[in-house]
């Protein structure tokens, strides 16, 4: 597994542990693919990332619509826990937290930028069938407490 994939796995796992189910979209698994029903208005520049058992990693990007990620590998959909993360931008503007920092370039960054969003969740595959958790189950499984 590459360092990039391990980093994404660690970030995804930490986001999963601290996810706010009220902000999470609803994952939909159908025909070996995953997409997310999100309620973020006027969103764009989506990235959907999925990590799963035995080093499974997949991601997809789309400018206008929530992307679809294929979950089926060489052995079909493997049993285990899969974590997904959907991120993107919204039309809502926010004050730029670092307007003077632009990766060492002399030009100044804009005073206002698009607000980003990030949703995450998980599901379990048992005998090749996706089992979606209820919000309470997802919250309770986040740290073993």
Image (spheres, grey):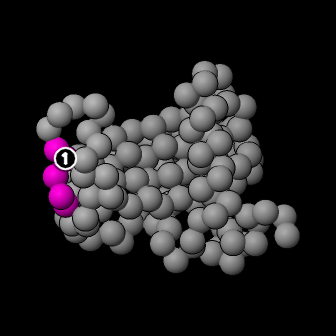
Instruction: Please identify the quarter of the rendering in which residue 37 is found.
Output: bottom left
Q: Residue at x 72, y 31 (%)?
A: 54
Q: Which residue is mark 1?
A: 109
Percent x, y of residue 58: 51, 35
Percent x, y of residue 45: 27, 48
Q: In the depicted view, which residue is nearer to us: 73 or 59?
A: 59
Mark 1 falls on what kind of element?
loop
Percent x, y of residue 46: 32, 49
Q: Quadrant of the N terminus?
A: top right
Q: In the depicted view, which residue is nearer to us: 37 or 9?
A: 9
* Secondary structure mostly seen in the magenta stretch: loop
110 magenta-colored:
yes
Q: Is residue 120 left or right of residue 90?
A: right
142 w.r.t. 47: above or below:
below
Specify few, some or many for label 1: CA neighbours under 10 Å numbering under 14, 14-19, or 20 or more.
some
Residues in magenta, as a range: 108-112
């Amino acid at each position: 597994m590459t360092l990039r994939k391990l980093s994404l796995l660690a970030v995804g796992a930490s986001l999963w542990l601290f996810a706010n189910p009220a902000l999470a979209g609803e994952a939909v698994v159908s025909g070996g693919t995953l997409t997310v029903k999100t309620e973020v208005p006027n969103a764009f520049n989506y990235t959907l990332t999925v990590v799963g058992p035995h080093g499974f990693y997949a991601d997809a990007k789309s400018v206008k619509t929530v992307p679809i990620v294929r979950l089926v590998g060489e052995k079909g959909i493997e049993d285990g826990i899969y974590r997904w993360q959907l991120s993107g931008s919204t039309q809502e503007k926010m004050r730029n937290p670092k307007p003077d920092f632009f990766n060492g370039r002399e030009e100044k960054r804009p005073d206002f930028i698009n607000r980003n969003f990030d949703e995450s969740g998980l599901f379990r595959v048992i005998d090749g069938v996706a089992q979606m958790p209820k919000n309470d189950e997802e919250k309770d499984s986040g740290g073993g407490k």
